[in-house]
Image (cartoon, rainbow, N blue to C red):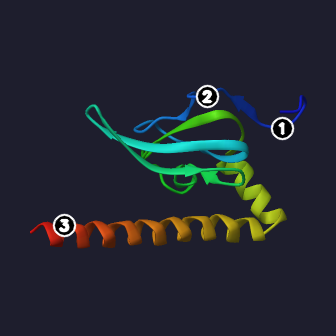
């Protein structure tokens, strides 16, 4: 990763944000990939692996709820941190940014809906 680039570099396995923490910013993955996991007790479930261009933690900008998942670097990762104030400023400069964030959220809702449907079908077969 080139020196002088914007964003922070995270080492393999390093946590960008942790489930349950208060979130006041989001991340844009510039290089590398991250895994998004949630845990209950000592059981961990991987929700997604996301790469370059992914927007993560955007719910923290819109809601005042604790983070819903932990995000960890897979290999070396460079991520840009964006807080609410900067996001709103950037959206006023480039309204297509808002569209990209909404498209990102929409894609995740669609993916989760598909997963829920598949799990429901699997559960029905087990009954």
Which residue was labeled with disc 3?
123
CB contact under 8 Å: marks 2 and 3: no
Quadrant in the picture for the N terminus: top right
CB contact under 8 Å: marks 2 and 1: no
- Badge 1 crowding class, 10 Å Cα cut-off, few under 14, some 14 to 19, many 20 or more, is few
Q: Secondary structure at mark 1?
A: loop
- Badge 2 crowding class, 10 Å Cα cut-off, few under 14, some 14 to 19, many 20 or more, is some
Which residue was labeled with disc 2?
12
Residue depicted at x 65% and y 64%:
101
Point out which mark residue 88 bears: none
Quadrant in the picture for the C terminus: bottom left
Q: Secondary structure at mark 2?
A: loop
**Nearer-N-terminus badge (2/1):** 1
> Residues under labels 2 and 1: Cα distance?
19 Å
Q: What is the quadrant of residue 53 in the picture?
A: bottom right
Left/right placement of residue 102 relative to residue 87 reads: left
Q: Foreground residue, 91 or 80? A: 80
Which residue was labeled with disc 1?
6
Which mark is nearer the camera, 3 or 1?
A: 3
Which mark is nearer the camera, 2 or 1?
A: 2
Q: Whole-percent x and y of residue 102?
A: 61, 69
Residue depicted at x 45% and y 36%:
21
**Nearer-N-terminus badge (3/1):** 1
Q: Secondary structure at mark 3?
A: helix
Residue depicted at x 74% and y 49%:
86
Q: Whole-percent x and y of residue 111?
A: 47, 67
């Amino acid at each position: 990763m080139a020196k002088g680039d914007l964003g922070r570099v995270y080492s393999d396995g390093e946590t960008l944000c942790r489930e349950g923490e208060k979130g006041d910013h989001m991340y844009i993955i510039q290089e590398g990939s991250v895994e998004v996991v949630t845990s209950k007790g000592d059981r961990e479930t991987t929700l997604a692996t996301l790469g370059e261009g992914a927007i993560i933690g955007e719910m923290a900008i819109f809601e005042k709820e604790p983070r819903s998942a932990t995000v960890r670097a897979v290999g070396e990762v460079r991520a840009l941190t964006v807080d609410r104030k900067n996001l709103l400023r950037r959206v006023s400069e480039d309204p297509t940014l808002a569209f990209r964030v909404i498209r990102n959220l929409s894609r995740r809702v669609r993916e989760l809906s598909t997963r829920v449907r598949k799990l429901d079908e699997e559960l029905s077969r087990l009954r």
